[in-house]
């Protein structure tokens, strides 16, 4: 007797039902929710995912950087929650983005840093509509993998969405508030 429903299912009824279930062909309802049409359980593969995060106000590098190189390093206090995933974590250090430097343009470090982060391009110093930053790596990946994903690209942010005007020493607000660029002149 089922404790929850109070109903009884005898052994003979169960065996009849199991026999019918074993003879069923693959039904649409048996494919995992959200899978694309024509996908079977056997043919399904783990979803492709890629994420880029940006911390515009910087971090205390020593708190993020392990003391030792290689795979046997001790996780820092901030990285400690990632320790169970050690085999899947890479900590990259010593990276620099030369095109985020002034290169003769003067002030505007924050705008240049945001614009160059995923593009690798030194942005054009302008507060007008003639912005130029280059296509970002996330958009290049999205374009090449679009057929394999339900959403080719999803950009999320917690900054204001101003994309016009002067936000940083002569650099457009589009540079300050956008790190994802679908084209050299249009944020994604």
Image (tube, helix red, strand yellow):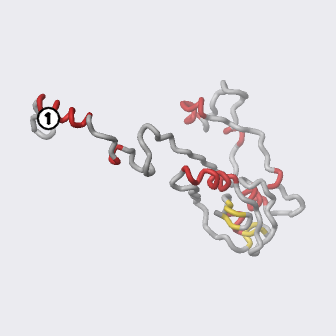
- On the image, the x and y values in percent for residue 119 come to 74, 55
- On the image, the x and y values in percent for residue 121 come to 79, 57
Q: Please state, as top left, top right, bottom left or bottom right, where the C terminus lies in the image.
A: bottom right
| Residue position for label 1 | 2
Query: Image height check: is 163 above or below 75?
Result: below
- On the image, the x and y values in percent for residue 177 come to 66, 63
Q: Please state, as top left, top right, bottom left or bottom right, where the N terminus lies in the image.
A: top left
Query: Image height check: is 50 above or below 80?
Result: below
Name the residue located 77 percent from the left edge and 66 percent from the top edge. Answer: 132
Question: Can residue 147 be seen in this snapshot?
Answer: yes
Query: Image height check: is 161 above or below 95?
Result: below
Res 179 quadrant in image: bottom right
Question: Can residue 1 be seen in this snapshot?
Answer: no
Q: Is residue 28 left or right of residue 43?
A: left
Name the residue located 81 percent from the left edge and 59 percent from the top edge. Answer: 122
Q: Secondary structure at mark 1?
A: loop
Q: Is residue 50 left or right of residue 114?
A: left
Res 104 quadrant in image: bottom right
- On the image, the x and y values in percent for residue 176 come to 70, 63
Who is closer to the viewer here, 102 or 132? 132
Name the residue located 55 percent from the left edge and 45 percent from the top edge. Answer: 48
Query: Image height check: is 163 above or below 85?
Result: below
């Amino acid at each position: 007797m089922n404790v929850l429903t109070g109903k009884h299912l005898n052994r003979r009824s169960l065996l009849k039902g199991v026999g019918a279930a074993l003879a069923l062909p693959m039904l649409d309802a048996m494919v995992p929710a959200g899978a694309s049409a024509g996908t079977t359980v056997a043919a399904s593969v783990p979803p492709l995912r890629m994420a880029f995060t940006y911390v515009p106000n910087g971090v205390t590098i020593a708190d993020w950087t392990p003391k030792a190189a290689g795979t046997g390093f001790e996780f820092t206090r901030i990285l400690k929650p990632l320790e169970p995933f050690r085999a899947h974590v890479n900590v990259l250090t010593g990276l620099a983005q030369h095109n985020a430097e002034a290169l003769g343009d003067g002030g505007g470090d924050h705008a240049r840093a945001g614009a160059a982060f995923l593009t690798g391009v030194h942005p054009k110093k302008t507060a007008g509509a003639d912005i130029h930053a280059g296509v970002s790596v996330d958009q290049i990946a999205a374009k090449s993998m679009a057929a394999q994903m339900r959403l080719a690209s999803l950009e999320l942010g917690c900054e204001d969405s101003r994309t016009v005007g002067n936000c940083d020493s002569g650099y457009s607000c589009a540079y300050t508030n956008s790190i994802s660029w679908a084209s050299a002149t249009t944020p994604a």
